[in-house]
Image (cartoon, rainbow, N blue to C red):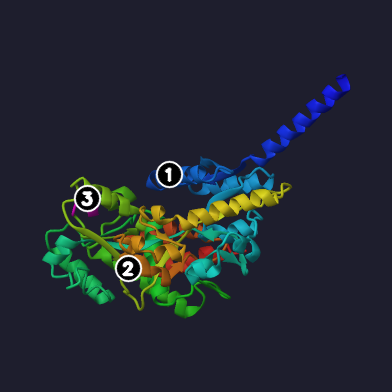
Amino acid sequence: MNRLLKKALAATALFALGAGMAHAKETVVWWDFLSGGDGVRMKALIQKFNEDHPDIQIDATTLEWGVPFYTKVQTSAAVGEGPDVMTYHLSRLPLGVSTNTLREITPEELASAGLKPEDYAPANFQAAQVDGKLYAVPFDIHSLVLYYNKDRLAEAGLIGADGKPAGLDTLEGFDAALKKLTDGPSDYGLSFQTAGDGGVWRVFYSLLGQQDGAFLGEGGVLPGDENLDKAKKALSAIANWSAQGWLPKATEYPASVALFTSGKAPLFLNGVWEVPTMVDLAAKNQLGFEWGAIQMPALLGHKATWADSHAFAIPNNVGKEISPEKLKAVLTVIAWMNQNSLAWASAGHIPAYVPVTQTGEFKAMEPNATYAPLAETAVFDPQSVIAGVASPVYEATGNYFVPAVNGEMDPAEAVESFRDDLNGQLP
């Protein structure tokens, strides 16, 4: 009897183990750097995913944005302790690949998730690659846009029949508009962050891109006289705005936003991430004017606008190869987030997944639908280990371009010093 009882108990244990395995959840450890409105929206998406997928559970942690996040990712992956998936800026991919922090996502793996290159704008998908290999899947395009106070522009005769700003599509026309707006009841014609590297870099890089200027080449940073001259032209245009009193000097980020929302500056250059601020203030009747946002005008040639992308990447956890089951779960997460990114667009972003931008729901979403065409003319940060968010490029912008914009340094001298500094940091 004892022998039969032992066999029965063993069989029961095996059955229970098998049943448990059949219903086991695959836990996906997730790291992101998303705070504020982005963080709220991402948490809602994660919750929805977990509700829809009883077999996969996202275990999410939010870490500090910028250098702290990327440093932690690099050190954790090096000892096999990184997450299973993480948010990542495409502009940081070259540095991540150079430090062996990122795992390649093969074409076969991408296809297994039901995703394909044609699902993304060409420039966006290209920015997700390093040396022809895919290291991240884009989730959005977040770019510089021009916010405008429609009431103030209408008073100045700068609104067209379509209700959008008119007469801004040349540097001369834009300058004339800034002068007219500043000479009117506004304190300034334009606002953006002039005390920090981010605001100045995004405007400068957009104007360089509008001239088809090459930031990097065989000759290093701003190679050759032609590209150097284009950079000087771009920075000189910005410095002139502040020198004329049309753009406030030494303005920190929060103050630059407040100048627009208070009506003191009718034009505002900033990222799409401030759309929720405008939406919320308007809903509370705290804005005091009708607002909109459009693609940055073509001031120095053709339309081109600085852009970056939040994306999903898989760390190369050294000594801890991701299992096929875990990889399948991670790819399921990435694909689902892309396919459900309409909710993410409410933060002002343009979904990277083109099928979402083609839906009626997105086309009715304003102002996103108005500036969405910028995805076709976006200029992503230079692909280099010295470029990207919180990089030497941003630091050099703060050291040279910011003083030039604020009248403390000659723009031509600033561009040359910027070039020489960064050339000394190239590998």
Q: Position of residue 42 (x, y in %)?
A: 44, 47
Q: Quadrant of residue 44?
A: top left
Q: For the point 75% across and 30% down, which residue is it?
A: 13
Residue 64 visible in the snapshot: no
**Residue segment shown in magenta:** 259-263
Point out the tag, 1 or 3, that comes first from the N-terminus: 1
Asked which secondary structure carries label 3, the reply is helix
Which residue is tagged 1? 44
Kindly report the distance in space between the C-alpha atoms of the residues bearing marks 1 and 2. 31 Å
Which residue is tagged 3? 282
Q: Quadrant of residue 177?
A: bottom left
Asked which secondary structure carries label 2, the reply is loop
Kindly report the distance in space between the C-alpha atoms of the residues bearing marks 1 and 3. 23 Å
Q: For the point 47% across and 66% down, which residue is it?
A: 380
For this orientation, the residue located farthest to the top is: 2
Q: Is residue 201 magenta?
A: no
Q: Kindly report which numbered mark, 2 or 3, lies closer to the viewer in this rendering.
A: 3
